[in-house]
Amino acid sequence: MPVTPVRIGLIGAGRIGASHASVIARRVPEATLVAVADPRPGVAAGVAEPLGARGETSVQAILEADDVNAVVIAASSVAHSDLIVAAAEAGKHVFSEKPAGMSLAEIDTARTATAQAGVAFQVGFNRRFAREFVAAREAIVSGRLGTVRQLRSLTRDPGSGPADPSAVPEWTIFTQTLIHDFDTLNWLNPGARAVDVVATAGSLTAPGHPTLLDHATVVIRYDNGALATAEASFAAAYGYDVRGEVLGSEGMVTMGEGAQSSLRLHDANGRLATTAHSDTELLADSYAGELAELANAVAERRQPSVTGDDAYAAFAIAQACIDSMTSGTRVEVAR
Amino acid sequence: MPVTPVRIGLIGAGRIGASHASVIARRVPEATLVAVADPRPGVAAGVAEPLGARGETSVQAILEADDVNAVVIAASSVAHSDLIVAAAEAGKHVFSEKPAGMSLAEIDTARTATAQAGVAFQVGFNRRFAREFVAAREAIVSGRLGTVRQLRSLTRDPGSGPADPSAVPEWTIFTQTLIHDFDTLNWLNPGARAVDVVATAGSLTAPGHPTLLDHATVVIRYDNGALATAEASFAAAYGYDVRGEVLGSEGMVTMGEGAQSSLRLHDANGRLATTAHSDTELLADSYAGELAELANAVAERRQPSVTGDDAYAAFAIAQACIDSMTSGTRVEVAR
Amino acid sequence: MPVTPVRIGLIGAGRIGASHASVIARRVPEATLVAVADPRPGVAAGVAEPLGARGETSVQAILEADDVNAVVIAASSVAHSDLIVAAAEAGKHVFSEKPAGMSLAEIDTARTATAQAGVAFQVGFNRRFAREFVAAREAIVSGRLGTVRQLRSLTRDPGSGPADPSAVPEWTIFTQTLIHDFDTLNWLNPGARAVDVVATAGSLTAPGHPTLLDHATVVIRYDNGALATAEASFAAAYGYDVRGEVLGSEGMVTMGEGAQSSLRLHDANGRLATTAHSDTELLADSYAGELAELANAVAERRQPSVTGDDAYAAFAIAQACIDSMTSGTRVEVAR
Amino acid sequence: MPVTPVRIGLIGAGRIGASHASVIARRVPEATLVAVADPRPGVAAGVAEPLGARGETSVQAILEADDVNAVVIAASSVAHSDLIVAAAEAGKHVFSEKPAGMSLAEIDTARTATAQAGVAFQVGFNRRFAREFVAAREAIVSGRLGTVRQLRSLTRDPGSGPADPSAVPEWTIFTQTLIHDFDTLNWLNPGARAVDVVATAGSLTAPGHPTLLDHATVVIRYDNGALATAEASFAAAYGYDVRGEVLGSEGMVTMGEGAQSSLRLHDANGRLATTAHSDTELLADSYAGELAELANAVAERRQPSVTGDDAYAAFAIAQACIDSMTSGTRVEVAR
């Protein structure tokens, strides 16, 4: 290919890291997977080598590698902002899984560092690359839906809830799960800003647990008057569920249905559509799409379409949810 | 009500007869169920009395009843044409279940008798009153679909096939089941006439049975060039299935999906829509609609929208299928 | 019919009153429409006479009529509770359109009066008779869905919003529209009670209007931990939209999709399902079902399945929404 | 990657050839596009160079290239069998677009040549790699559907029909279009063989044209008694339409619906799903899947899952259709 592919070093070879490695190597022709780093001995090599890349046990090896010009961060969330800053200082372009930090301050530091370094900075809001969400956004931007008035975004994780509720960091449902919905809602309400938030949540799979919140419903008010609902659950028996809905003055779009394909099996029980049971299955094309966007942005010397400002705006809603849960009231969203 | 309801005598209290009785009494305000006749002692009364009507054991009692001005025939198919003629001669309006006779000659006799008597004559092609088929026909007649080119109509009976294959009269799949599809195809291709037919059928639930045909696929060529397929099965494990499809030069309509309601149950198996398992459930509104049409036609002193000519035209295709099965070749459709 | 039909006097011949009149006369064989009252000269007769009933200009004529044993109230909402009390005192069974009163006190008076008079008392929560909602409730009650955890109920009125915003009484979106959703949510979460509510609403079709609220999103917390969202809009360009969703520990049900039939029209624009544009179209079977329930309850000398307590419980949520809008905070639901 | 990718030379840079080139280069990590040949000056280079491959103007350059070990044939159908033989004789593995020849004799020559050369030989029946068709086949093979009894496969090309009917080679609808459906039906009825065929077809977009057939309906009888229908149209105003349906003794599967994504746009017209308007859009994943199968088969030193025998069996049905059209009767399928 005439364009030199972006050469990627991946940090973190856990479930999502391994998925990103495979996607980069197999689904993103504009990018080359060069190296994978993970502190656990042999883990990075186990992921990297079958894909023609090398394994490393230190982040530093990635940051100092001359044959790497972009870093994909899939490490623990608490490390995200430090890694973004370190990568920026090493002159690498950066893709970070969401959230870009564990506080607004961290995210601000990260976006400032990447801006000062002049590198591309993209956050992993993969829903923006799902075909139906892209088409919804186009319908909204084109004016076909009129003024946006009422929105819904929903994320439900498959299964029956956390095996060990205490292993789930506090506020995870807002900072890790609903952060996707907050970004989606911001993006589907172009030009509007979230004004305030009221969050309602509980621990329904482990009643009485002191910190787990496994179901949450959040209402966000925007400065264009639009009312948005974000819903999450950690326990969807029927699979991984991602949906959206936007009511405008001229119509409505709905997105997401979760069927694995157009196959319908009809038997004595009725008509059955099998459903996707993981994010990497349901959103396979989106994972490829977001990494292709990174590669294209680098090649075209522009910022990716999902920016640090987007990361900040989504986290500001998550933070307001945390404050709303603590205070029990409606809370303004920081700018 | 200012319009005197049509006063109906029902002949035959089997499964469909009992259904018609209930529909007339409960779903058709323009009609009154007056009497039900069935030769089996007590059967007619058992159906009629809870609905406020009287039971009779002879057809004659219906035909001679002064308080009956229309007859609904749901007796054995072999009796249909004789009953139509007798009812017409008695001056009663007539609704007959399909087919209107067991041969083209019988149907011709029936339509002639009703015409000479000046009574209304309607045949039970209920699919014409199903909402989605009505809307399809409107789309076609309005020109929105352009020229009709390729059609499909399908009927599948629920279950695993005939318990006693020898109890199924020969050619039943054409004269009793596909007759609905033949009429539907004629009706959805307005102004066109069936030219020739080739039928393919077999006994798949009772392989080797000498007369049973339980699956059939028929191709009909129309004089406007349109190609139509009619399919039937006596063994749909997933329920009663009625569908249609019309491709025109400007678009396509599809009809039928069988879900009982918009409820979808999502669990570990996927997303399930329960399906209707009987004609009287799937087509409940159509059964009411066809009997309301009879009542309205009588009240308005006009012929019903489904005529003896329609009965003849559909049976002509069924007869051509029989001939095609016998000869193994394509057969012209009688005019 | 052996059971004497319930003999109904209808109060109010506006849009919904006229619809109820027709439904009683034509779709509910267990009931007879005897009389219709409306103070506007000729209006009641215009509705009643084509249906074989008589028109009256005074409510009193209905309440004193010996040939009426049940009253259906479709008058202005502000008159509901007084009419319920008057009907009960006249010894008539009562069906009242929702809400059963304009305050919790009014509804309490109404349910007390009917209880003391020993008459049947039903409120017009028609969604309980929609096939998909009935099936959803059965799935929940049967345990197939496990524990109820997260719910959604939605109502959107067709069109582009109120022509005259000032003609819409204050808080209508809660007391007239969302009252359906509040009852639906209570009913789909059997045995649970609403604990508190936070409401978010705005005037989006008439920005800045002092009293109109045309879009609202309400979050309700139940004492079994379940989180429910109720959403309403007065301006759905695409038709009348009623949907529901219940997530349980074992699965999810979704209800409502609005297509008029299974017809799909495919043309250069794509595949189109036409949608219902009025409540009486979308919920035609539900309107018949709720009035059949009244008739059956009277015939069987029992209370209908939708009680005054249900009316109270739903209004308690509406009242909490009003208080939440006034205070800007989360508000407890009165018991 | 540890496995050396298959190194592909592509013959033919027309619409499908260009699509294959892009798919190989961008969607099939197991394969490398090395060269593209097309006799039209500059055409091959225009396709190849942006993808990092070289353009050639002669087939010979591909067949003699040491760095090519597999050939993908997307040239004119009349050249397919000669190219397959030449590639086999040059020791290259072969993927050929369907049909593998223009007669049964040609296809037999092609499969014999590849067998003798010991190279992999795959035919481009892409539907076998579409997710819903794969899942259907799995349901059938697993026994979940019971015995296969009635099948349907359908292909409709988008648009309003051939711009120049005389430019369409005779019998194209059978040999180029329905050949996909014939293979699909064979594949979805595992272990069964087509016994006889009756074809009905016409020129409906250019009535009276001497050779064009633009709509066809074919009925195939299998030796397990199953009845199959294959339908094609060259003029689907609503897009490219590929569907399948298999009724078994225990249930039914349906495949295909054509929506571009799960987005539904609701406006005053109703609820709209946009549809795919080309094969390369609708079947994008299938095109990648079939070329990955070639690469995997070569790497694993096995024959691909779609064989020369499959090509022969599908063409035998196409040939029987031609004979059926000529004779007007049912025709046996050659073995």
Image: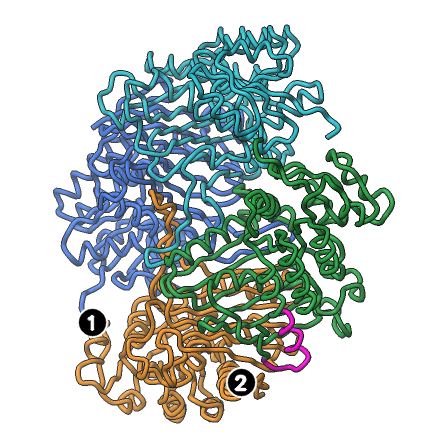
Chain colours: A blue, B green, C cyan, D orange
**Residue A183 or D197: which is nearer the viewer?**
D197
Point out the stretch of residues depicted in magenta.
Answer: B318-330
Q: Name the residue under label 2.
A: D328
Hey, what amino acid is under mark 1?
Pro
Q: Can residue D80 be seen in this view?
A: yes
- The quadrant the N terminus of chain B occupies is top right
Q: In this view, does D155 lie above or below C153?
A: below
Which residue lies most toward the right here? B41
Hey, what amino acid is under mark 2?
Gly
Q: Position of residue A216 (x, y in %)?
A: 42, 30
* Disc number placed over residue D50 in the picture, else none: 1
Q: State the residue at coordinates (32%, 55%).
A: C269
* Disc number placed over residue C153 in the picture, else none: none
Q: In the rendered image, which quarter is residue D42 located in?
A: bottom left
Left or right of B263 in this view: D192: right
Q: Where is residue D26 in the image (x, y as percent from the top left)?
A: 30, 67
Q: How far apart are marks 1 and 2 (CA)?
A: 51 Å
Q: Is residue B284 above or below residue A202?
A: below
Q: In the rendered image, which quarter is residue D213 located in?
A: bottom left
Q: State the residue at coordinates (52%, 29%).
A: C50
Q: State the residue at coordinates (62%, 54%).
A: B118
Q: Is residue A41 above or below residue C105?
A: below
Instruction: Report if residue B326 lies within the magenta region.
Output: yes
| Mark count | 2
Report the predominant secondary structure element of the magenta stretch: helix
Instruction: Report if residue C221 lies within the magenta region.
Output: no
Q: In the rendered image, which quarter is residue D296 located in?
A: bottom left
